[in-house]
Image: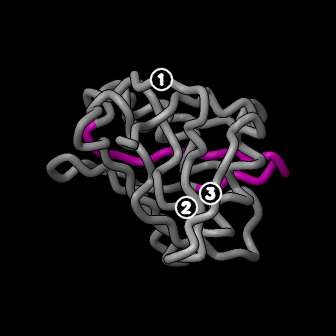
Amino acid sequence: MNRFPIRSDMPGLSNVQVSLHPPVPSSGTATVIDTAGKSWVLSYGKAGPVLTMEIPEDGAMCSFEPWSEYPDYWSASGLVVNTERVGLASGFYRCALLLIPYLGGLHISPSDNVTPSGRGLWSKLDPTIEWEPVETTGGFRLDLTGRSAP
C-alpha cells in the first residue's frame, strides 16, 4: 500500500496561544503561552523546504517539512525538548499551524515514522488518529485502514 498523510486540526492545541513577531513569517520570533499559562519565546526560520524552530537558551528545537508526494501536508521531521518544561512540543506544533500556510503548505499530518513518545504527544494533539506498530523500528505509523489518499 502506498503511504499518505492525513489531515489533523490538532484539537488538543486549543489552549496554546502564539504571537508571531513580526507577523510576516519568513523568520522571526514567537511568544508562546502554554497550557500551564507559562510564556516563552522561540525563534523560527525557513531554509529550503524546512521550517525550523528553536529555543536557544535550552536547546529545544523542532523542524517541519512537506511530504514529498503531498507538499500541502507537512510533518515534524525532528523534535527535541527539555522534558522538564511542560508544553514545549505543543507550542512548536501551534506555531507550525500558523506558519505553514505562509510557506506553501495547508495541513499538518503526523509523520509516517513516529516514536513511542511521539505517539504519546499525538494522542494529546489529536486522539482520533489511529496507529499501527512498525516492528522493525519499534515506532508507529498511521493506520490508513478505510482512508483515502488526499
Q: Secondary structure at mark 2?
A: loop
Judged from this view, the residue extending furthest toward the front is 1
The main secondary structure of the magenta stretch is strand
Residue occupying the far right of the picture: 36
Report the residue at 62% width, 57% height from top.
89
Q: Which residue in the rendered view is the most extreme toward the left?
A: 48
Circle 1 residue: 148
Q: Position of residue 120 (x, y in %)?
A: 74, 59
**Residue 124 versus residue 103: which sits nearer the camera?**
124
Dot 2: within a 10 Å radius of its alpha carbon, few (fewer than 14), some, or many (20 or more) residues? many
7 left or right of 124 in image? left
Q: Is residue 94 left or right of residue 28?
A: right
Q: Amino acid at mark 1?
A: Ser
Residue 27 highlighted magenta (yes or no): yes
Q: Which residue is mark 2?
A: 114
Instruction: Give the CA separation, mark 2 to mark 1.
Output: 20 Å
| Amino acid type for the residue under numbered disc 3 | Ala
Of the residues under marks 2 and 1, which one precedes in the sequence? 2
For mark 1, give the secondary structure.
loop
